[in-house]
């Protein structure tokens, strides 16, 4: 109980810091604060589908993978579901929607049910990020279909809004994939790395994991993810959407229809 309270306080502190930064950015961004806030809110609402899809499918993938490996725990807690309500932490959802950083409710799993515990934890750990990548590719193909079949619709008012939302779904899922692969607790990348190199059950794992909230706050406040994953993600998006699909992904992503 004390640990949970500590984690909630740390997360609340992080949200307050990010909110202060966001308000400061709007205040110095030129124009009236009200106009900046209005545009920001509209663009944020258009991010809603991307967040709901990205987080829900990420957590569902963890739950389904663990269930398929013989673990009844996710089903017992109602997590083998694509319903966003099963996976959304209220504070994490609001934070992600308005501040660009958030979290879902971690899926409870019991690796003792796996035939091979180490391999099972790697599979479950990677299930979420692989699902995010698959979604990014599939939605990219939908955009490509619109571009090929009805380019005039893509350039229309409604079409530009739809393309923006779809491209946001693509980019958000790529971001979730890359962010969760960072080898820092409590992210998936750390657990996968711990099992690959065989120290998941050693004392050093638990010592590092006990500092997970502090490490995560430092990671976000100093924008370390932005510094290490932005360029690789742009290269990946260029390859997926530019080279493979030949769609103007950067235009759809950057140019807001509002």
Image (cartoon, grey):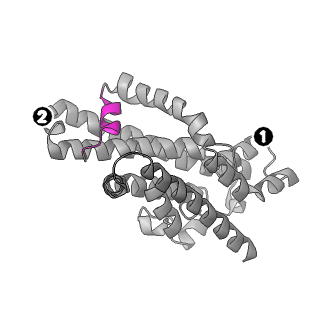
Residue 253 counted in the magenta span: yes
- The spot of residue 151 in percent (x, y) is 16, 32
- The spot of residue 158 in percent (x, y) is 17, 47
Q: Secondary structure at mark 1?
A: loop
Q: Residue at x 57, y 62 (%)?
A: 16
Q: Quadrant of residue 51?
A: bottom left
Q: Is residue 71 visible?
A: no
Q: Quadrant of the N terminus?
A: bottom right
In the image, 169 versus 71, the foreground residue is 169
Disc ID at residue 72: none
In the image, 152 versus 74, the foreground residue is 152
In the image, 213 versus 242, the foreground residue is 213
Residue 27 counted in the magenta span: no
Q: CA distance from mark 2 to mark 1?
A: 52 Å
Residue farthest to the right? 203
- The segment highlighted magenta reads 247-257
Q: Is residue 132 visible?
A: yes
Give the crowd class for mark 1: few <14, some 14-19, many >=20 residues within 10 Å.
few
Q: Residue at x 66, y 51 (%)?
A: 120
Residue farthest to the top? 243
Q: Is residue 30 above or below residue 52?
A: above
Q: Which residue is mark 1?
A: 197
Q: Is residue 156 left or right of residue 29?
A: left
Q: Is residue 55 left or right of residue 125?
A: left
Q: Which residue is mark 2?
A: 152
- The spot of residue 208 in percent (x, y) is 79, 52
């Amino acid at each position: 109980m004390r640990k949970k309270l500590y984690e909630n306080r740390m997360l609340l502190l992080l949200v307050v810091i990010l909110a202060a930064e966001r308000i400061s950015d709007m205040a110095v961004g030129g124009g009236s604060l009200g106009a900046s806030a209005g545009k920001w809110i509209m663009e944020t609402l258009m991010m809603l589908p991307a967040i709901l899809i990205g987080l829900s499918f990420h957590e569902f993938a963890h739950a389904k993978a663990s269930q398929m490996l013989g673990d009844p725990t996710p089903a017992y807690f109602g997590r083998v579901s694509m319903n966003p309500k099963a996976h959304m932490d209220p504070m994490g959802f609001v934070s992600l929607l308005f501040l660009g950083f958030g979290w879902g409710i971690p899926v409870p799993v019991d690796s003792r049910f796996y035939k091979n515990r180490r391999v099972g934890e790697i599979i479950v750990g990677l299930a979420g990020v692989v699902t995010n990548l698959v979604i990014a590719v599939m939605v990219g193909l939908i955009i490509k279909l619109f571009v090929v079949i009805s380019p005039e619709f893509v350039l229309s008012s409604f079409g530009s809004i739809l393309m923006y939302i779809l491209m946001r779904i693509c980019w958000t899922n790529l971001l979730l994939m890359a962010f969760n692969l960072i080898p820092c607790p409590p992210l998936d990348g750390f657990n996968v790395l711990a099992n690959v190199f065989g120290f998941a059950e050693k004392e050093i794992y638990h010592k590092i994991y006990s500092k997970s909230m502090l490490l995560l706050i430092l990671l976000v406040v100093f924008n370390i993810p932005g510094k290490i994953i932005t360029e690789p993600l742009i290269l990946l998006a260029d390859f997926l959407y530019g080279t493979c699909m030949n769609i103007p992904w950067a235009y759809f992503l950057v140019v807001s229809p509002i």
